Amino acid sequence: MADDKRSPLREQILDRAKAHMASHEVRAIEVPEWGCTIYWTPMTLIERETVRRRSQANGLADAAAHIIVMKAIDRDGHKLFDLDDKRVFLNQADSGVVQHIANAISDDRPLDEQVADAKKNSPTTDAAT
């Protein structure tokens, strides 16, 4: 009976929402420190919620490592890491690099906006002063 009260547009809107998500481009970040490029697809709401809960329960470092494990793929779309690899990111990898990758993956703005903001917010040195 509940189905009788649903709008006839429901299926059309849901299909468009799914198609829109599927149309997002795969993003990439060059990681010169590791000699590689890491790719990912945009995060879903449930993935964002997982990260939020992990950061509250286990801290930001755990959440950053988890983002990489959860989202990092290679050029062909194959998952790069599993949960066993998270220990390496937490204990044996440069925290700045791990955080930089996790921030890029979790930032859903277009890449050109991310780059512009990074340039705007990066400290500059002025030799004339």
Image (tube, rainbow, N blue to C red):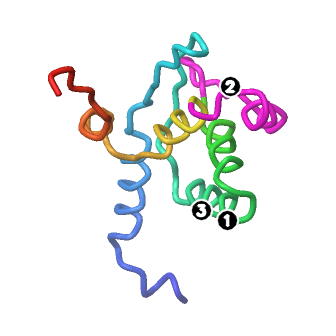
Callout 3 touching callout 2 (CB < 8 Å): no
Compare marks 1 and 2 and give the one earlier in the sequence: 1
Location of the N terminus (image quadrant): bottom right
- Examine the rendered structure and indicate whether residue 92 appears above or below residue 13: above
How far apart are labels 1 and 3 at the CA level?
Answer: 11 Å
**Which residue is at the front of the view, 77 or 34?**
34
Q: What is the magenta range?
A: 73-96
Q: Is residue 81 found inside the magenta-colored segment of the image?
A: yes
Residue 95: say if magenta. yes
Tag shown at residue 56: 1
Which dot, 1 or 2, sits closer to the camera?
1
Query: Which tag, 1 or 3, sits closer to the chain's start?
Result: 3
Q: In terms of secondary structure, where does tag 1 sit?
A: helix
Q: CA distance from mark 1 to mark 2?
A: 25 Å
| Percent x, y of residue 108 | 40, 47
Image mark for residue 49 = 3
Residue receiving disc 2: 80
Q: Amino acid at mark 1?
A: Gln
